[in-house]
Amino acid sequence: MNDLGSGGTPVRALFARVAARAPALRQTVAEQRAAKLQKLVDAVFAHKAAIYAAVRKELHLCDTDIDAQLMMVKFEAEFIVKNLKDWMRRRPVPGSIMSLGKTSYVQYEPKGVVLNLATWNAPFAIGLVPAMGALAAGNAVILKPSELAPDSAAVLADIVRAAYPEDEFAVIQGGPEVAQELLALPFNHIFYIGGHAVGRLVMKAAADHFASVTLEMGGKNPTIVDASADIEDAARKISLGRLSNAGQICIAPDYVLAHESVHDRFVEALRRAMTAQYNADGKGFENSPEYPRIVNARHFARVRALVEDARDKGARIAFGGQMRAEDRYIAPTVVTGATEDMKIMQEEIFGPVITVAPFRSREEAVETVARRPKPLAAYIYAKDRAQIEYFLAHTTAGSTVVNHNVIQSGTNPHLPFGGVNHSGIGRLGGWYTFAECSNARSVVEEGPPLGDPNMFFPPYTEKYKKMVASMLGRSLVVPDGVVRAINGIIKLGSPFRRN
């Protein structure tokens, strides 16, 4: 474990060792990379008891919710191992009329050294899933877990040390000063999952070294409940999406726009759903063994301030609102009557609080969504297909789920996961993480000479000049089959040509 301060020398020394190792990692084959990923997964499960203890202490999560996070890690690793050999192959691409006789392909090569600045709300999934994609692509990786989840960070360090040499995959612990020191170093790619303030710093730091970035920064995720929606079903699913991890999920529904004809019925159904899920025995939400807590006192105070600001400005607490600072407990809370001047409608809540507002027309709902930066996720509840298509066509988001929520991340590695502009840059998951951490290198190999090879070099002949000029007057896009046929003829004829 590296527990490093702001002195700089240990961090820079580690980076130098990792950077020196990176060229050798580029030469590793799929079987070698896959074996190490499997060793990493084995180490994760060997540390299950320590993982449970850390996450229980930090977020008060039950073992089942922790298992769901570990399942994401396991599934991602298995998917990578299954497909890695194919991903690493050279990918032939079709030729064109202007590349006749040549062979063209894409070769994926590692970028070099990758930094993962991971956040605290799902420390093992966020710490390991991007790193696994980077390692699969042949990079060396440095992971800095969040200092807001120090127990999880320590377990992550133990897990990684059990699976990888430090110069291939290293964990550095510490606070903002360590992050700043890391960002001053010439990484080739940087992952950051977290808030906008730090995301801007990451982008600015990456620019100094022209490093590529993958940023996922959340935002205010809208949920539209149409008049045609199954209200009970929508309430049950939105309750789960909002309250899981105490609402501390980047893709959690942040605010609901419910059609005015179902608004009141939805609010009541949401109250019943929250109660059924976390207070079915009537002993209180605070006594449920499955109800999580806010990560620390600062974030507790932030969420409480959002609710108090809304209430002071005239919003109604339709359900919940109880809070207890000693154990960072915030009851499931539904706020109605919130207006645009309230902070709760301007900032990402990231807590077990949700606002519900009515809308009259679908145009009004779309306009409300468009007033905010493009979200990481959007949710649509409707049975009317025309309404679903309208909302899909007139909103934008990094991902969208119809008639459910929070099921698009970590469940299907064939889908890219990420944001749009304010909510993120780049994509994660399966092939997409591998591609983010790879340089897609275009390679063209010269083939047999086509006609007189000298005609392509100055001084240009009149024949060549006319040929080039004539091409401007016709379509240059020729069907792939025609190009393949011509290339086949060229290859067949090449042994008979004189040098």
Image (tube, rainbow, N blue to C red):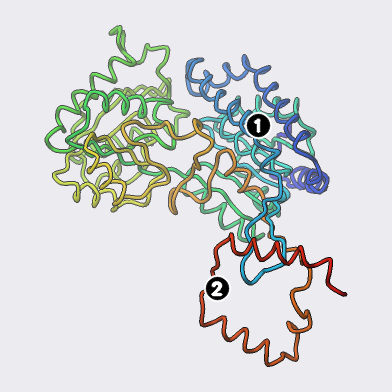
Query: Which residue is depicted at the point 28% across and 16% down?
Result: 275
The quadrant of the picture occupied by the C terminus is bottom right
Circle 2 residue: 476
Query: Is residue 289 placed above or below 353 in the rendered structure?
Result: above
- Mark 2 is on which residue type? Leu
In the rendered image, residue 448, in percent from the top left (x then y), is placed at 79, 68
Circle 1 residue: 82
Q: Secondary structure at mark 2?
A: loop
In the rendered image, residue 115, in percent from the top left (x then y), is placed at 66, 45
Give 58 or 237, whichever is nearer the viewer. 237
What is the residue that sits farthest to the left in this orientation?
Answer: 261
- Mark 1 is on which residue type? Lys
Query: Is residue 55 placed above or below 7 in the rendered structure?
Result: above
Mark 2–mark 1 distance (CA, rounded to whole Å): 39 Å
Judged left or right of residue 226, residue 216 is right
In the rendered image, residue 200, in percent from the top left (x then y), is placed at 51, 53
Query: Is residue 51 placed above or below 377 in the rendered structure?
Result: above
The quadrant of the picture occupied by the N terminus is top right
For the residue carrying disc 2, how many other residues have a C-alpha within 10 Å: few (<14), some (14-19), or many (20+)?
few
The mark nearer the N terminus, 2 or 1, is 1
Give 182 or 396, whichever is nearer the viewer. 396
Quarter-of-image position of residue 288: top left
Query: Which residue is depicted at the point 37% across and 28% down?
Result: 241
Query: Is residue 422 placed above or below 224 in the rendered structure?
Result: below
